[in-house]
Image (tube, coloured by chain):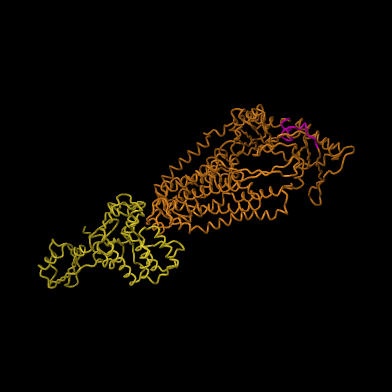
Chain colours: A orange, B yellow
Amino acid sequence: MQSKTSFFNITVYKKNLSKVWLLGLAYLTMLLIQIPVSYLLDVSRYSFQPEIYGLEASETINYINYMVDSLSVASVGILPCIMAILAVLLVFGYLFTQKNSYMIHSFPISRKALYISGVAAAVTIMVVPVLITAVVTIIAATATGIIADTVLVILYWVLTEIVLSVLFVGLACFSIMLSGQGVTGAVFYGIFNFLYMAMQLVIYVYLSVVGFGLDNLPENITVSPMCPVLYTSMHDYMGIMGDFEWNESSTVITDYVTKYEGTMYLAVYLAAGILLAFLAYMVYKRKQNETVSEFISVPIVKPIYKMGMSFFIGTFMGVGAVEIISDSFDWNYNTMVAVILLITIICEFIMYFVIEMLIEKTPRVLNADNLRGFGIFAVATLAVLTVAKADVLHLVDKVPEDTEDVKWACVWVDYPMVYEDPAQIQQVIEAHKGVIDNRKEIQSFYYTQDGVKGGYVTITYEYKDGKQLSRRYYLEDETAEINSTSYRACAKQLLDLVNEPEAIKNNKICPVYNDAEAKNFTFNTVTWDAEETYYQYNDFEGGVEGMDRKQIADAIYKAILKDIDEGNVGQQHFYDMYNSQFINTLYVELNTNTKYESKANVCWGGEPYYTYYADTMSINITDEAKNTISTLLELGLIQSEDELVTVGESNRYYN
Amino acid sequence: MIQVNNVTKSFNGYKALDNLTMHVPKGSVYGLVGPNGAGKSTIIRHINGVFKQDTGEVLVAGEHVYENDAVKMKMTCIPDEIFYFLQADTIDMMKYYKGLYPKFDEQLFYKIRECFPSIDLKKNIRNLSKGMQKQVAFMLAISSRPELMILDEPVDGLDPVMRRQIWSLLMSDVAENGLTVLVSSHNLRELEDVCDHVGIMDQGRLLLERSLDDLQTSITKIQVAFEDELPPIPSEIQVLRKISSGRVHTLIVKGEPNQAQRVIASMNPMIMDVLPLSLEEIFIYELGGEDYAVKDIIF
């Protein structure tokens, strides 16, 4: 019977369910295997694995850990994402063939009722398996005695899955309503899932090539909530996480604390899903039945899609092609930009007319109207890319305005140097400004083959609000007289900053290096085996009369500190010093008596951490490290300097 | 029952319907004829609410039909290509129709089914022959108790016995319940037997719309033979076509038949026979020839 309400039809709903129930069954099977079955298998193996990370842990903690692991595996976006598009394609499959669409729309049921009954079936087939899985999981948790600790975790998982179901069904509906073809609708769905990051990537890639100092821009792309399938598939962003807590002696795990990641995005995703579903309905309501089987069935989307895809793919291909071929040509910066623009326009032309062919379903699209349209589009593209190159957003000139806003600054030539003191941060900013002021000259370094050695320097600032500003430059030897005085001055300013002995010790060793004790060391000599034609490494296992290994390590450590103070070790330059380093290995193991905050990881996005241990100090010494070398000689670790071989010397043997 | 007023519809610049106006009286069986590409299926899709017109209006029972469930409940449609759900058998489809049409008569469905004994109700409809699928479509459509039935090439694929069976069922419904039928077909011979109104379409327009009786009496075929050559025909008689074979001349004359008969009789022919025109002949003459070139359009 016809439902009393005009927005829902039970007959259509049931018919839709009959189309997708097998999909729901498959989804339920996967969820059951991933969660309760996996959990119970883990529990059944418990007697054989009573420990976690080698630490003693109670049965309950182990069980909770198993449960969270099982839920975490299942709580990913990829499965609901795939299920949603399949369910929506099955439910609204009638929209992609004329016969079916015409017949369904001739029945006495409004589009509103057709749509809502369809969406309801798609959501049902995604939510019911989640609920059944949750019930089975709760039974399993109850049976194993951890229900009190895990009920909230299970409910959070249910909530997450329901929200993701709504989000992906909404997105899937919106995607398929834009097209008259099922496959194209699915492709649109894929595009929308990655659209934000894809656009960001193209813009960043273009700016990284044409913008001064921006070539590390693409590396700053992080997974965005605007890419739901990626964002929700990563546990760090969304889902259930757990942390162990252990006793002071770190022998027993005492507790397991669950964390609910991405809670703030649940509401956003739910709202987005509902909004997308509503927009999809608005599109459906206005959709003309005669557009069935058309590539794009909404007129306003045709130019947006055609121009958007042409612009982004054209630009990406333009930049990519130049990156590939530029090594074969001696182009300067301006020539390179011109070639990028030219190839971009050519690629855009191809894309523009290929998409036009798909839209119009004919290869005959090279007519005056389309050519005129492309001409206008090409001019607009050139204008946009030229404006972007002109740095209207001041990305190139940007440095922190106030040191008070900056948490730390990092200059990375050979290794990262982190500065937290406002005065030092100011020095970094000044040196950075010097680089920007010499932009024109520095920009030419990469393209001109002037024979001067060069390398990259990365300058990164982290603001107190957590945002980062990072720039990378290709700089040349600060002593090369071919370069201007102004450039050499700014390069020297930057190197003076990173080569300051105190800064080297703080960063290369640790901030409490004076408090560090050398515990042990590793050193080897090398001898060339002419028969086997390779270097044989000989670890120093012996001792020194009257000294234990700790004392030897301490003597080496003091020599290294002296070399750093005298500017013999840890010095950085804008060119590769690899050839002058010894291939001999020298490690000194250090401990500190006071806990300190290590910033060793912050430059590549890691968090600072507190430790008593300085990282094992690996020192790449050169023949300039005269104090260290003489100590090695005095202690008898080497008999002559010939036992120290540089990379450059070794290469001569190998070659 | 159906009122189409000045409807225009274009597809990518091609005008499929050009200011079309047509009227289907309640309780009539209206045959819509026209050459391929005339716009018959397009106007049918407007009438059953599938397409939305660019301009004009399409009314069924006095109401706009597009996205109007209440009106659509009064009508069923059998398109030239019928859609059935994947894996559905006849019973499944019956339940679906029952859920959509409040007046669906299950008893009637099983009663009609007796007329189609070869149909296995439990067999997947997509595995039935094309003719059987059409029979199922009629079973479902008639059982929905519509006031209007729209048929697009309805009996294609049916054997002669089954065609007669179906028309008989429809005609009973027309006679007993006042069902209105709009039927589009190329089989003019068949339409002639069942229709009481005819509309002829070409190039998105309705060239002619009239009751079949009027139509058949507005054009006359007169066969005459004179002793000598055919004398000049008075201008008061509009001759659409003249075919001569020896002394025998066949004249297709438009206008009131008795008047034409009187005038030609006054010319003292040796023989004169007045013959009725079939719908097929009318269709051909209206469109100006077998090639459907519109040369002698009379309206």
Q: Quadrant of the C terminus of chain B?
A: bottom left
Front residue of A512 and B261: A512
Front residue of A45 and A515: A45
Front residue of A573 and A357: A357
Q: Position of residue B89 (x, y in %)?
A: 44, 65
Q: Position of residue A224 (x, y in %)?
A: 56, 42
Q: Is residue B153 left or right of residue A147?
A: left
Span highlighted in magenta in the image = A502-518
Name the residue at the top extreme.
A423
Q: Is residue A618 visible?
A: no
- Residue at the (43%, 63%) spot, across then down: B92
Residue B230 is covered by the magenta coloring: no
> How many discs appear?
0
Q: Is residue A214 visible?
A: yes
Residue A509 is covered by the magenta coloring: yes
A149 is higher (above) or lower (below) than A565: below
Q: Is residue A283 left or right of residue B53?
A: right
SS assignment for the magenta stretch, majority: helix
B222 is higher (above) or lower (below) than A454: below
Q: Position of residue B262 (x, y in %)?
A: 11, 66
- Which of the 4 quarters of the picture holds residue A599? top right
B45 is higher (above) or lower (below) than A581: below
Q: Is residue B80 left or right of residue A471?
A: left
Q: Quadrant of the N terminus of chain B?
A: bottom left
- Which of the 4 quarters of the picture holds residue B126? bottom left
Q: Position of residue A163 (x, y in %)?
A: 53, 47
Front residue of A629 and A68: A68
Name the residue at the right extreme.
A545
